[in-house]
Amino acid sequence: MFQKSLLHSVELSHEKSLQTLIENRSVFSLENCELSLFETHQYSEKVPLEFNDFVVTSMLKGKKRIHYQDRTPFEYLPGETFIVPPKSGFKVDFPEASENRPTQCIALAIDKRIIDDTLDFLNDKFPKEGTANLWRIDFETYYFYNSQDLANAINKITKECMSENVAKDALSYLSLQELIIRIVQTQTAKRLDQNQFLVMEANSPIASSVDYIRKHIGEPIQMKELSKYACMSSSTFYRNFKRELGMSPAEFIIKEKIKYAKRLLNNPYIHINEVSFATGFEDSNYFIRMFKKYEGITPKQYQLMNTSIS
């Protein structure tokens, strides 16, 4: 699992301004959205929540446990986002919340019109390649780590909602459009990570190039090969790939190589140079730098943490 990007911190509400210790709510309303800042200062279980609009929630501080539909409850931590369709309730546990360790979470309710207008615009002006491969929000992929781009988009809209800028409604409109795009891209990347993308987007030439990358992950992979495999020019392939996944083909290849390297590192006897060679890195020092960039630790540290020799 790659590193998640944290959001900018928001100052906690003053104790005297709290109306309740459980999900105290501060609201910032704009024309096309409403930002709620929720703070909880004591342990609690199964607190019900429901919103009338589509809502993007992101954790800022502390830990929650989410009970959503008939799914397995999951821990919800800073650097993570959970999206909820309109009028879809869920329940929240606060296993560690206290006066000294409050939880803090934002919930951004977005007007349906701006979502529909943004997706219609994207499908009209920037259609994805492949039959019936549309820009859409996938409510089955409702929980994911924040990419840096997604975190930046959420930070931007949060800042606009809380500002006193007279133009904040206009600025927030543009920021909301970017946020919708980043959500779709992040969902696509997660489906890729969970091997769902190739099934769901079977008619997409991007899917075929992803399949090619994974089958040749131990080899040097050239952009020319990928674009030829997708039946596109190099520039068209690069533009479509980055638009759909929110990352360049080169960055995706690096991430796939590191994911494969992690599987190899589960063997306590394998040497780091062997892993570097097996994943197609010609320079082991470069492999170590890239691994640490995306995982936050070196390959050797990862291997020691995840293996033991009896």
Image (cartoon, rainbow, N blue to C red):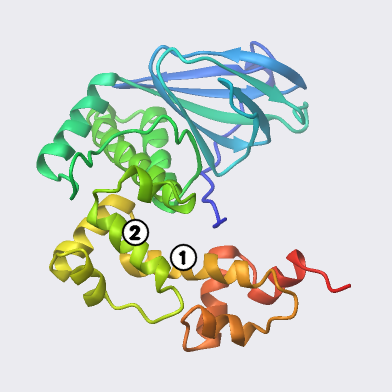
Residue type, mark 2 in image: Met
What's the CA distance linking mark 2 and mark 1?
A: 10 Å
Q: Does residue 286 sit above or below 55 in this rendering?
A: below
**Relative image position of residue 40 (x, y in whole percent):** 67, 23
Q: For the point 19% across and 47% down, which residue is it? A: 128
Examine the image and state in which quarter residue 45 appears: top right
Q: For the point 11% across and 38% down, which residue is it? A: 124
Neighbour tally class for label 1: few under 14, some 14-19, many 20 plus, Cα within 10 Å: some
Look at the image and tell me in which quarter the C terminus lies: bottom right
Mark 1, secondary structure of its residue: helix
**Relative image position of residue 238 (x, y in whole percent):** 22, 64
The answer to whether any part of residue 196 appears in the image is yes
Q: For the point 18% across and 71% down, which residue is it? A: 228
What residue is shown with label 1?
Answer: 255
Q: Residue furthest right?
A: 310
Q: For the point 50% across and 41% down, which residue is it? A: 144
Neighbour tally class for label 2: few under 14, some 14-19, many 20 plus, Cα within 10 Å: some
Q: Does residue 208 sit above or below 185 in this rendering?
A: below
What residue is shown with label 2?
Answer: 247
Residue type, mark 1 in image: Lys
**Relative image position of residue 101 (x, y in whole percent):** 75, 33
Q: Are marks 2 and 1 in contact (CB under 8 Å)?
A: yes
